[in-house]
Image (cartoon, helix red, strand yellow):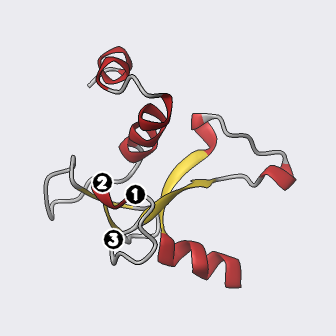
Amino acid sequence: MGNAVLKEAFPDPEAWRIEQVWEKGMRTTMGDPSIIRLDEQGNFIVRDHYGRKASQFGWKIDLIVPRRLGGSDDISNLRPLHYRATRKGAAA
């Protein structure tokens, strides 16, 4: 689906941003890519579980390069990341 079509489908800027980041998740043969994907660490994430910390498949939008190192909120610096991966990264 092209960006113009996606933008029409998601008139709310935050919904548009979430969808753009979701599209960056890796497709898997385990299910419909509009529903389930993998983050870059191989964790399963479910589209409708965005923001659900308690979910086994919950995910958030993460910065690839942190702001303190010059990263921005530009879509090119965003990725979908499972909450469990976020906690691992924070502890490391």
* Mark 3 crowdedness (10 Å alpha carbons): few <14, some 14-19, many ≥20: many
Q: Quadrant of residue 73?
A: top right
Q: What residue type is disc 2 on?
A: Arg
Q: Is residue 28 above or below residue 8?
A: below
The quarter of the picture where the C terminus appears is bottom right
Q: Quadrant of the N terminus?
A: top left
Q: Amino acid at mark 1?
A: Tyr
Mark 3 and mark 2: Cα distance apart in space: 9 Å
Residue receiving disc 1 = 50
Label 3, secondary structure: give it: loop
Contact check, label 2 and label 1, Cβ < 8 Å: yes
Q: Residue at x 85, y 53 (%)?
A: 69
Which numbered circle lies on residue 7?
A: none
Q: Mark 2 = which residue?
A: 47
Foreground residue, 54 or 33? 54
Mark 1 or mark 3: whose residue is earlier in sequence: 1
Query: Which mark is drawn over residue 57?
Result: 3
Query: Which amino acid lies under the numbered mark 3 shown in the image of this protein?
Result: Phe
Question: At numbered mark 2, what does the secondary structure look like: helix, strand or loop?
Answer: helix
Q: Residue at x 30, y 54 (%)?
A: 47
So how many labels did they put on this image? 3
In the picture as drawn, the residue positioned furthest to the bottom comes out as: 91
User: Which of the 4 image quarters holds residue 18?
Assistant: top left
Task: Identify whether 54 is placed above or below 59.
Answer: below
